[in-house]
Image (spheres, coloured by chain):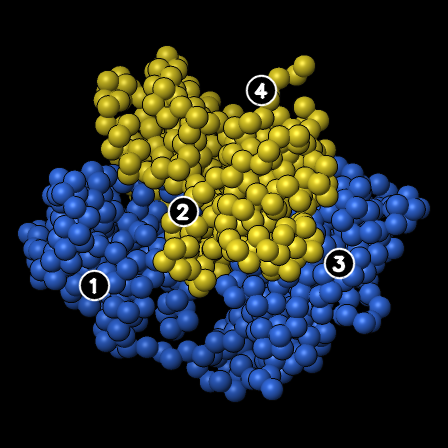
Chain colours: A yellow, B blue
Amino acid sequence: MKQPQITIIATGSEITAGRSIDTNSGWIANRLFEEGWKVRNFIALPDNPKTILEELLLLKRKAENDPDNPILAIMTGGLGSTEDDYTLQTVLDLQNKEREVVEKARIKLQKLIESRGRSYTEILPAMLRQVYVPSGSYTLDNSAGIAVGFAEEIAPSSFLVCMPGVPAEMKEMFNRRLLPFLKRNYGIENLKQTTRWIWSIGESLFQEEFMKNQKDLLSSGMDWGVTAQKGFIKTIFNAKDESLLNEVVSRIQNFYKELCTEDVFTEVHESLSLSRKSLAVAESCTGGLLGAKITDIKGSSAYFLGGVITYSNDQKVGLLGVGGDTIAKFGAVSRETCSEMADGLSDKTNADYSLSITGIAGPDGGTEEKPVGLVWIGRKKKGKPTETFRYLFPGNRETIRENAANTALYLLHQILPEREIK
Amino acid sequence: MKQPQITIIATGSEITAGRSIDTNSGWIANRLFEEGWKVRNFIALPDNPKTILEELLLLKRKAENDPDNPILAIMTGGLGSTEDDYTLQTVLDLQNKEREVVEKARIKLQKLIESRGRSYTEILPAMLRQVYVPSGSYTLDNSAGIAVGFAEEIAPSSFLVCMPGVPAEMKEMFNRRLLPFLKRNYGIENLKQTTRWIWSIGESLFQEEFMKNQKDLLSSGMDWGVTAQKGFIKTIFNAKDESLLNEVVSRIQNFYKELCTEDVFTEVHESLSLSRKSLAVAESCTGGLLGAKITDIKGSSAYFLGGVITYSNDQKVGLLGVGGDTIAKFGAVSRETCSEMADGLSDKTNADYSLSITGIAGPDGGTEEKPVGLVWIGRKKKGKPTETFRYLFPGNRETIRENAANTALYLLHQILPEREIK
């Protein structure tokens, strides 16, 4: 089956005015990539029916003029109930069609409105706009909301898909309804994918020292990508032939050893959940960011006790029992203070694992001896002495703080028991 | 002067594969909006010279065929030194031009390379790619990096602007070099802008209960937008006539009273910095997020002492001195526990202002009586009794936590002394 040229379209004036960031398109591209399709381009358009119609007409003409290269356009947004939701009308104009009601969705909406009582009946007419599609469309049910999605054939084997812009609704609709439709129409390549994280190196060094020597795998059909994260890079490989992926993973692990990990955040979470070990944090320059990252994961209350944010020196002494003389002699950003922070935290909380961070996030406060980016991280396993690690992170305040918090989790990851169900 | 149709183009396979989010385009759109220009659309393209050339040719032909509607295309990315940086070559193909070196940039690069010692001379040839532009281009110096940007006239009064994809470099280049160029070529409308935040309401309610009654201002030339944040909405108004903005601000303040604020994060920071009052936080369900937000702002060490993350009940007792019987009787998520958290924090840190948060972020842990989204926030000014506030935030775990942290800062904002230099 001929693979389509894929365009993802996000509509919304808040996007093209720079007030809101379109995350739907990236999510869709990522899901398509996982299923074996590559995206040609993204387009974002304001809520302006003329502009939207112009762009859709361009795509339709291109598909009509070049039937050997079908187009798949996936559009999000503009299916709501307010005046600036133009998607349905624009598609009706594009296709020269009338609208038709999706009876199942209409009944669901009516029941919902009625259950909310009388005051809602006045908004019913506007809400009803969301349960119409172009006549004869392939309908995409919305299991997480009201607005119905649809797919229109704009040229032979070329489709325009319209879904709501609300991420939760769009994602449900994509996975449950759109994906089966796409597989039927375009087949799948059945691509396998694997990722590895590599710590403390940048993208260009990875390309230079590792990827340059993988020409044999790349010429055999492996594809790769890398994205810089904070403190690590995320490498992604895909291929139809799984043995290529096994080979590259084996090489990457050999080359980078303990710097190569899987998803550290998930593995730390799973390991602590299964082993029933507890964790506490003492944060200075990260100011709560490490705790926020840990508790971002649901279920982290099973092992995360909490900790202290000791942004000022007084609080390092008061809340953690760091020696005032230690800070006076070595400074707040020092191996000694970092070590006493982890010790004090361990004493106060009795956690199985204690992490401490102290550093200079900048932009001010750096010196020649202790520049901006210098961060000490302490790691203590209960009953053992605290180990300390010195880092000099590049970048601005935000980057340094993210680097520090992520790297602390990496250091914890290094000493966790294997993630096995005992 | 005729205003251009503006297209913003981001290049990068990491974007169209969904592995990285394009934030440059939104930033540029926002800056252009502030200067009085509206963007027609965004495009994101993979690092594929054929695709990029195709899109640029479309724009060029459109500009040539419709000289009354000039086009301004602003493209980021693809100006680096690696093999997948195709922008320069593509523009040379588009314009049928040769490249020329930017001598000033070449000398700067050479000096930089030499200063790093011999091992870098082997990478000089690749690096040198970055200091070439199409011959006769308008050059955009890079004060924050190496790669030179440029603007090419693709049709009369229509320009294609190319800038690096590194945000810090692009932003510097935009503000310092591109903006003056655009103002010379397209004039400016000199739009005034103002924003207000409104707490605890959604976008649609704002439209329904407030904006519907502003038709007089809208028909006089005021433009508006709104973006949903976590815990508040951000409303934006612009107009050439400043009195329209003064009028809408006066109406919005009258209508929403204390729920209407300016930028709370900035005002809290400025107020505490100037008044030299100290702040501490005690976080349960937010797990450090509030501290992370506060310390995200440089200079927050002037007033932020730190605090405690008491994710477990034991730590609420151990680190803050909350009564074990209080938790047993009323629960960890209760007015009483929240109040004792703020009291304990105030005792431990002696901060001028103490904030406490305890709630149910979900997805698990909710009951009929205490559903997911229930959050208590405590606010204590030293020497006065703690006040507590009950919220029921909508959304998922992330949204609830963001809502809680932002709203805590809003509650603090309400009792801060006026931000005046005494």
- Does label 2 or label 4 sit earlier along the sequence? 2
Numbered circle sitting on residue B348: 3
Residue type highlighted by circle 1:
Leu
Residue type highlighted by circle 4:
Glu
Q: Is label 3 in contact with label 1 (beta carbons under 8 Å)?
A: no
What residue is pinned by disc 2?
A392
Work out whether residue B176 or residue B2 is closer to the camera in this orientation and state it.
Answer: B176
Instruction: State the separation of the CA atoms marked 2 and 1.
Output: 32 Å
Residue sitting at x 77%, y 44%: B315
Instruction: State the separation of the CA atoms marked 1 and 4.
Output: 53 Å
Instruction: State the separation of the CA atoms marked 2 and 3.
Output: 33 Å
Residue sitting at x 47%, y 48%: A375
Total labels drawn: 4
Q: Element at badge 1? A: strand
Work out whether residue A402 or residue B99 is closer to the camera in this orientation and state it.
Answer: A402
Residue type highlighted by circle 3:
Lys
- Does label 3 or label 1 sit earlier along the sequence? 1
Q: Are marks 1 and 4 on the same chain?
A: no
Category of crowding for the residue at label 1, using alpha-carbon neighbours closer than 10 angstroms: few (below 14), some (14–19), many (at least 20): many
Q: Chain of mark 2?
A: A
Q: Element at badge 2? A: strand
**B54 left or right of A389 in image:** left
Category of crowding for the residue at label 2, using alpha-carbon neighbours closer than 10 angstroms: few (below 14), some (14–19), many (at least 20): some
Q: Are marks 2 and 3 on the same chain?
A: no
What residue is pinned by disc 1?
B140
Considering only vertical position in the picture, is B235 above or below A262?
A: below
Tell me the mark number nearer the camera, choosing from 3 and 1: 3
What residue is pinned by disc 4?
A418
Instruction: State the separation of the CA atoms marked 2 and 4.
Output: 29 Å
